[in-house]
Image (cartoon, grey):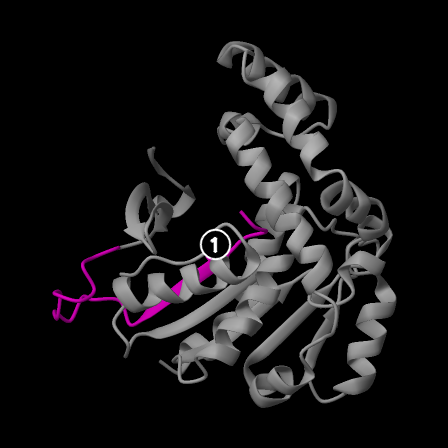
Amino acid sequence: MDSKLKEDVPVQDEFVLCGGVETQVLKCGPWTDFFNDQSVSRPKLLIFIIPDANAQDIKDIYGLNGQIEHKLAFLRTQVPRDMKLVLIGHSVGSYLVLQMLKRDPELPVIRSCLLFPTIERMSESPNGRIATPLLCWFRYVLYATGYLILKPCPEIIKSLMIRMGLRMMNVENEFSLTNAFQPFCLANAAYLGGQEMMEVVKRDNETIKEHLPKLTFYYGTTDRWCPKEYYEDIKKDFPEGDIRLCEKQIAHAFILRSYQEMAEMVADWLKDDLSKL
């Protein structure tokens, strides 16, 4: 998929081998061979976005720990160590960002933006109380059901189902989502989700305290994965931190309707950091 965003920013899809698996990378902007390109035009900064989940072989790469190690392996093998980084995590991607900072505290990160961060008590959240039994206790039932229903289903039918669902939600269909209806993808998502419910329990206050000056948290007011009380708790524990509460009623899954608004907001937050480069 080669396309262009507004303002003529080049966008391209690429697959790289990372951690023993083929990894899809969506590249925006002047992407070069960072290791071999020493010209003055080489970018000084990489903005690394870690969405809600989805050099060496990594054990259990589709699990929570494997996903953390996978992101670190990507930075080790694809990005020079001296390149400044901005890490942006959404949902459980925020948990991954904190774990990356914990495991490699020398990463040259100038700012980490944690959007609608599921970094604690996931199974106790309103959505977690529903998801936990499904993902932890009935996971194999989901596997079997998904395989029996979706495996024989023609791609055209899957595509039609997705378009109808997005139309019902009044969401623009700009990206191909048919891969999400593959039994293998659904099984991996359920496996990872089950681990998230069991392991994302206690907020990592030690890591947050160590990196607080370069962390920005953004909580929602209607978020059923990290409710407002989680914002109030972390705000009480870290009153000096950059911890914000959404005043625009943006949903947890902002990628469906509010992606442009969120992108502009995050870009505005980064202006001060980027001006110092």
Q: The N terminus appears in which quarter of the rendering?
A: top left
Residue under the point 78% across and 65% down: 121
Which of 195 and 215 lies nearest the eye of the viewer?
195
Q: Is residue 49 magenta?
A: yes
Give the answer, above or below, for where 42 lies relative to 243: above
Report whether 77 appears left or right of 37. right
Residue under the point 46% across and 53% down: 61
Say what secondary structure mark 1 lies in: loop
- Residue identified by numbered label 1: 60
- The amino acid beneath tag 1 is Asp
Q: Is residue 153 magenta?
A: no
Residue under the point 64% across and 31% down: 143
Q: Which residues are magenta?
A: 31-54
Magenta segment main secondary structure = loop
Q: Position of residue 213 (x, y in %)?
A: 58, 87
Residue under the point 56% across and 85% down: 211
Does the rendering let one see residue 118? no
